[in-house]
Amino acid sequence: EFVLTQSPATLSLSPGERAILSCRASQSIDSYLAWFQQKPGQPPRLLIYEASIRATDVPARFSGSGSGTDFTLTISSLEPEDFAVYYCQQRRYLFTFGPGTRVEIK
Amino acid sequence: QVQLQESGPGLVKPSETLSLTCTVSGVSMNDYYWTWIRQTPGKGLEWIGYVYYSGYTMYNPSVKSRVTISIDTSKSQFSLRLTSVTTEDTAVYYCVRYVVDVLAGFDFWGRGTLVTVSS
């Protein structure tokens, strides 16, 4: 069974700090990985696709990297509006989402 | 701008059929995959399936025996039908556009609609 795992489950940081979120696939998915941001009461918002390409209007402080089974989303300097839940999603084997990482204010 | 709006009953009885419609505006339905995704606190985000503008469909094996997704491009709508529902089908249901071009992704989402399965 294909599985995406994300770590950590929760990341407690202050505005201005760097956030590094991890997503690991149980099998290689090449670069077929996307990242989403979700705030309470809103649908997920596409941030990154094909592992490293920012979607339209996504600020440059968001960057994605990785290929194969290990991927990273980096937020270079947290803004107040960045505190949210982040999901990775793969499209190599149909579509599955990771369980999410909550980025909370420390 | 591209907008998607879910509509349908918010309460469905166990063993009955869940039916939702998504109305699309601001874009032609041609050349896109129109998708249903649901979200629960327990299982997280789950892709249910999609329909291409031509009518071609693909479904998640976990619900494949119970689900039908259809499209009516003349009305700019696509629909979800899920039969024999249980409390496990209680979720927020999103309709989503999936674009496959040089790059691919779920780029536009509806606001979501909560469907509760309860007697």
Image (cartoon, coloured by chain):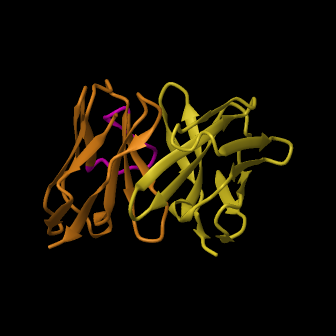
Chain colours: A orange, B yellow
Locate residue A16: give its quadrant.
bottom left
Which quarter of the figure is the C terminus of chain A placed in? bottom left
Q: Any magenta on residue A57? A: yes
Which residue does the image show at 65% across and 35% down from the upper left? Answer: B32
Q: In terms of image quadrants, where is residue A100?
A: bottom left
Q: What residue lies at 66% left-to-right and 55% top-to-bottom? A: B84
Quick check: B31 left or right of A28? right
Left/right placement of residue B24 relative to residue B47 reads right
**B114 or B3, which is in the foreground?**
B114
Is A69 drawn above or below residue A45 in the view shown?
Answer: above
The range drawn in magenta is: A50-61
Query: Secondary structure of the magenta portion, mostly?
Result: loop
Q: Nearer the viewer, residue A45 or B43?
A: B43
Q: Can you give x and y, in whole percent of width and height, for residue A54 in the image?
A: 37, 41
Would residue B66 be found to the left or right of residue A85 on screen? Answer: right
Residue name at image x 51 percent, y 45 percent? B47
B115 left or right of A18? right
Visible residue check, residue A10: yes
Q: Nearer the viewer, residue A63 or B100?
A: B100
